[in-house]
Amino acid sequence: MNKKIGIIGAGNVGSSLAFTLATKAVCSHIVIKDIRENIVEAMCLDISQASNSAKSHTIVTAAKEAKDLKDCDVVVITAGVPRKPGMSRNELLLINANIMKSVIADIKDNCPNTIIIVVSNPLDAMVYAALKTSGFASNKVIGMAGILDSSRMSHFIYEKLGYGAGQIQSSVMGGHGDDMVPLTNYSTVAGVCIEELLNKKDIDDIVQKTKNGGLQIVKLLETGSAYYAPAYSTSRMIESILNNEKKIYPCAVLLSGEYGYTNIVAGVPVMLGINGVEKIIKLELNEEQKNQFDKSVLSVKELTDVLDKEFF
C-alpha cells in the first residue's frame, strides 16, 4: 500500500504507534517529527530494524524539516506537554493550543489534503483548536479517545466476568475525561448485553473504573501515562481510513446538529473511511444517558470557551 503517515511528537504514544504501524505493514512510509532530533533518529533506526525483522515493507524516517511531511495521507498529532504541579487546567490548555497552532501551520503548508488525528490532551479541546487553526473540513480532523475508553471498559467487563476475552464490545460517548459516558446498554459479550450478565453494583463499578482508567495507570507509573492502548487505538483508526473499511468507532468530532449540538467537539460513533469521517452515527440515548452526555459536552465547552476568549 503506497500510503504515507506522519507522526508529530515522538513520546511514548508516538513511538508505540510508529512501531505498531511499521511491524503490521499498515503503510509504505512513516515519517516522525519531534524537536528532539537525535531521539527521533535513534527511534527510526530501531523501528526500521524491527520492521525488517517482521518482513514488513514499511520505511521509517525522521523529519528533519517540516517539508518532510509533504504528501502525508494521515498525520497524527501527539505533541504537547503534560500538566505539571501548580499548573492550572487553563494554563495547560493554552500552552498545548499554542503547540497545536505551530504543528497545524506545518501541516497546512506541506500536506493540506491530509486527514488529521489528534491524540494530544486535553483531547476534545485540542481537536477544536486543530479545526479552528487549520480551517480543514470537520470530517478531516478527528480525535482519538473513544476507542481507547471503550477498550478500557471492555477490560473491566472481562475482569468482572472472568470470560469473554476477545468477544467484548463496549461503547463510550462524550468527552475524554471524568464526564465520559459509558453506554452499558450498548455494551455486549458475544452479542449479549452486559446488563443481562452482571448486576447493577458490578456495572456501576465498571463504569467508574472506565472513567478513571487513565488515572489508574498514571498513579501506578508515577511519572507518565498510558501509551500502548492509545497507540493501538490510533492504529485502528488509521487502518480503517487507509483501507476505506468504513468501520464504526467512537471518535471526537465536531458536531453540526447531531445529538442536539453545533460547533462543539464530542465523542460519538462515526464511520471512518478514505474521506475521514464518512458519517456520524446517531444512537438513541435514554434520559439518564442524555443528561450525562449533556454534562460531558458542558465540560468540553468550558475549555473551548476559554480558547475562543483567550486564543482565537
Image (spheres, grey):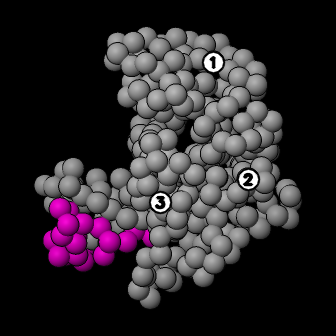
Is 143 displayed left or right of 69 in the figure?
A: left
SS label for mark 1? strand
Q: Are marks 3 and 1 in contact (CB under 8 Å)?
A: no
Q: Are marks 2 and 3 in contact (CB under 8 Å)?
A: no
Q: Examine the structure image and report whether residue 303 is included in the region drawn in magenta.
A: no
Q: Which residues are magenta?
A: 180-202
Mark 3 or mark 1, earlier in chain: 1
Mark 1 or mark 2, earlier in chain: 1
Q: Residues within 10 Å of mark 2 (few under 14, many from 20)?
A: some
Image position, residue 122 (x, y; %): 63, 53
Amino acid at dot 1: Ala
Is 59 displayed left or right of 209 in the figure?
A: right
Which residue is nearer to you in this view: 284 or 9?
Answer: 284
Measured in 3D between alpha carbons, the distance from the residue under mark 1 to the one under mark 2, in whole angstroms, is 25 Å
Residue at x 17%, y 62% (from the top left corner): 190
Residue 62's label in the rendered image is 1
The answer, for residue 3, to whether it is visible in the render is yes
